[in-house]
Amino acid sequence: MITFLQRVTQAQVNVDSQVRAKIGIGLMILLCAEREDSEIEADQLLQKLLSYRVFADDDGKMNVSLLQLAQKHALNKSVGEVGLLIVPQFTLAADTQSGTRPSFTPAAGPERARRLFDYFVAQAVARKIPALSIETGVFGNHMQVSLINDGPVSFWLQTRKSATPKSSPALH
């Protein structure tokens, strides 16, 4: 599985001109299942995502994970919740090595991708992390995603080495 995460001060997803999901401070992630992915990769990616240190500590160093930030917010109820906005995006698996049109054959098919997206979200919710609000985009729908990237801080995470060549070394 692949995720492109962005540290945000706010993010939202609109579907049919209606706000579907919205968060403040937290992470907005684009999530993609590849052909050979299973629940194992979803679990691995979720664990890595929650523990990936992308928020500043008291010394200004990126040394605080989403889980730690949520725990800190849970202790200080006056600061509100931390958000995790999960948006399905199959185009992350695109093969862009040749031609002028990307190939999406590395991406999981729609049924498998939906099942893994739903599983990933359910596993995140099941953790019942205090002060962490989990919102989602809508699988299979055309969405408008807006965000304010804080930093900017963006990372590409992948659970295993894919056979898919990546077109942009900057995303690794």
Image: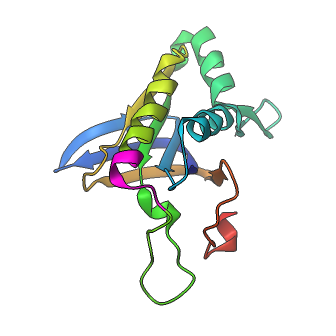
Count of numbered labels shown in the rendering: 0
152 vs 99: above or below: above
Magenta-span inclusion, residue 4: no
Tell me if 58 is positioned left or right of 171 in this view. right
Residue 69, horizontal then vertical, whole percent: 65, 25
**Which color scheme is applied?**
rainbow
Could you tell me which residue is drawn at 49 percent across and 18 percent down? 126
Tell me if 55 is positioned left or right of 19 in this view. right
Residue stretch in magenta: 107-113
93 vs 86: above or below: below
107 vs 131: above or below: below
Residue 19, horizontal then vertical, whole percent: 24, 41
Q: In the picture, residue 162 is in which quadrant?
A: bottom right
Residue 38, horizontal then vertical, whole percent: 54, 41
| Quadrant of the drawing holding the C terminus | bottom right
Residue 165, horizontal then vertical, whole percent: 63, 73
Could you tell me which residue is drawn at 50 percent across and 25 percent down? 123
In this view of the protein, which residue sits in the foreground, 10 or 93? Answer: 93
Could you tell me which residue is drawn at 60 percent across and 33 percent down? 43
In this view of the protein, which residue sits in the foreground, 27 or 89? Answer: 89
**Residue that protrudes farthest toward the bottom in the picture:** 99
In this view of the protein, which residue sits in the foreground, 61 or 92? Answer: 92
